[in-house]
Amino acid sequence: MAAGYLDILRARHAARLLTGTLVGRLPNGTAPIAIVLFTRAEGGSYALAGALAAVYGLGTAVGQPLLGRAVDLYGQPRVQLPAAVLSALGMTLLAVAGFGSLPLAYGAVALAGVATPPLEGGLRALWPSVLGSEDRVHRAYAMDAVAQEVMFTVGPLLVTLLVSLWSPAAALLVINAIGVLGALSVVLSEPSRTWRSAPREAHWLGALRSPGLLALLGSFFFVGLALGSITVAGVAYADDHGRDSVYGWLMAALGLGALIGGAVYGARQWSGPPERRLRVIVALLALGYLPLMLTPGVVAMTVLAGVAGVFLAPAIACSFIVVDRHAPRGTVTEAFSWLVTTFGVGAAAGTAVAGPAVELGGTAWSFAVAGAGGVAALLVLLVTGRVLAAPGHSAVAVRGSENDRNGAVEPGFSSGHQA
């Protein structure tokens, strides 16, 4: 298992790109907790903290596909680095100005969200040119999904450490400065500087003109909804058992399950259409969420949370392959960015729905939202099976013409999308 991942990391530029992308995404991964801690330290209410975090999330949802399209049109360095700097300036403005003017605070957070650079989609666009073979690209997608789990675990810990050592304002400044350095590391690399998207057909819908991509986005909205609802349901469960630490155990088990699942998934080669494989994985994901409604004792619930997380990273990794197959020519970064946005919007919807579910029916009902989300995600894939079975181009992940100006590609791989 480890040998396959080491093979990827030994490839020229691979370790730098993965590390730089994860570091560059730290501000995005830690923004909710950083904003809440800063707001509370400045005397703001939880309602204000939640509203600011929501504005940041909405800004990110709007900005990611727009900046992704800009990357496809103008290249990575000309978009990613200026966006990272603007986003950091937004958070710096919040940290320096505080809440003397609420409109200014909201504007600063909105700027930080909208300008968040689409590093996640950009990395996936670079993997084919860096790794060459389809199997290695697929394994990199799995490694990418696993690395995200690590980032979302380590990031909040880093914020709390900075807060304890200095202050919430200092945490905002340091995290965003680190993020700019991560983006800088990526855009100065040779693959990022030389990458060019394939020529694209002018269309106002961009990547969204692909029916297969729309079907996938519809499914992953509900996957995001399921995951978002679990964060609220976990808090309710911890309250029921009188210990805040229970929530940490549940989230840690969920993350550990995803780490294990992603590592195992990426360690082997898979045959057959990824769309069919994705249906199976999402079915298992839904099946893992449903037992959470039983809300047993803490030990059993922690085990169930770990099982529920096992198929999350494989589902995300497999979705990357499906996005790659269905993205219209010249829209690869935008298409990946839409997946990020849809998943995030779904997660926000899940948190919004799970709260009232707790009030109406208790903790079990909030976990039922997660189960329903998993089932809905599967139903979307089943209903749109015919659309997903017809990729917009040849069924390979490696897209030579998008990464090689001379059109040179590895033998056996397509030179680009079909017209």
Image (cartoon, rainbow, N blue to C red):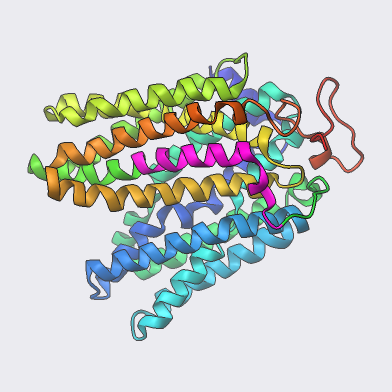
Which residue occupies 78% across, 51% down? 193
Judge from the rendering whether residue 358 lies leftward or rightward of residue 309; answer left or right. Answer: left
Question: Eyeballing the image, is 198 above or below 170?
Answer: above
Q: Can residue 167 be seen in this snapshot?
A: no
Give percent across and percent down for residue 280.
47, 20
- Left-right relation of 178 to 271: left
Give the magenta part as a residue range.
204-226
Q: Nearer the viewer, residue 220 or 56?
A: 220
Residue 186 appears at what percent x and percent y? 66, 50
Q: Is residue 219 above or below residue 101?
A: above
Image location (x, y in percent) of residue 317: 54, 31
Q: Residue at x 15, y 31 (%)?
A: 295
**309 falls in the magenta region:** no
User: Which sits in the foreground, 398 or 371?
Assistant: 371
Q: Which secondary structure dominates the residues rendered in magenta?
A: helix
Q: In the image, residue 86 lies at what x, y percent? A: 58, 70
Would you say residue 57 is visible in this rendering?
yes
**Residue 220 lies in magenta, yes or no?**
yes
Q: Residue at x 54, y 31 (%)?
A: 384
Residue furthest to the right: 406
Above or below: residue 92 compared with residue 319: below
- Quadrant of the drawing holding the C terminus: top right
